[in-house]
Amino acid sequence: MSIIGWSPPAASTYYRVSASSDQLLFGNELSLHVFDGTCLDCDGWACSIKPQTCQIDNVCYKHGAVSPHNQAEFCDSGASSTSWTFKPTTTPQPTQTMWVSISGPDANGNIHCDIHDLDNKVNGSDVTYQWLINGQLRLEEQLKSGTTTAETHISDLISGGGGMVRGLQFSI
């Protein structure tokens, strides 16, 4: 016996079934309702989706199941029981492991810059520091090997006019 037009059952499918010995004359037709009990509760011809499940594209999935077509989507029955939900993504917050602090001028007129390096990536000779006054480059030097502190006298920065030390740029 062969079943014409048969395909694997979906979550809920209705069939009309009859039998024939010669494929010319058929017996009485019966209706058959086949459903997947994973996600459906059916009573006769009416079905409802069970809690904690999804019926997506006529296929049943349990809550939390990942889409076979896209790993970024999953069955989230709380959001939708009939469509995929994108997995929430979390962006790791960067942790600040390096920063610069400026102090001074001290009693001798020196300005100090300290590079705070929690990861110990700074090797003094790899760092160039730049002193800026009102956004204009006034001094650029390499740190001494093994140090994380730069120092300059205020007169080296503001000779020829006043200004305010706005910051220090450094590159590694």
Image: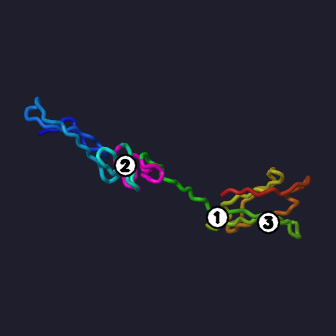
Of the image marks 1 and 3, the number of the one nearer the N terminus: 1
Q: Which mark is residue 112?
A: 3
Q: Residue at x 43, y 46 (%)?
A: 83
N-term mark: 2 or 1:
2
Q: Nearer the viewer, residue 166 or 3?
A: 3
Magenta-colored stretch includes residue 138? no
Amino acid type of the residue tagged 2 in the rendering: Ser
Q: Quadrant of the N terminus?
A: top left
Q: Main secondary structure of the magenta part?
A: loop
Disc 3 residue type?
His
Q: Nearer the viewer, mark 1 or mark 3?
A: 1
Callouts 3 and 2 close, C-beta under 8 Å:
no
* Residue at (86% x, 61% y) in the render: 154
Relative placement, left or right, of 147 versus 53 is right
Q: Position of residue 47 (x, y in %)?
A: 34, 47
Pick out the residue farthest to the right: 161
Separation of residues labelled 1 and 3 (CA atoms): 20 Å
Residue 142, horizontal then vertical, whole percent = 72, 60
Q: Name the kind of residue labelled 1 in the image.
A: Thr
| Mark 1, residue position | 97
Local crowd size for mark 2, using a 10 Å CA cut-off: few (<14), some (14–19), many (≥20): few
Q: Is residue 89 above or below residue 28?
A: below
User: Is 168 left or right of 68, judged from the image as shown?
Assistant: right
Residue that carries the numbered disc 2 in the rendered image: 48
As helix, strand or loop, the secondary structure at mark 2 comes to strand
Numbered range of the magenta stretch: 58-81
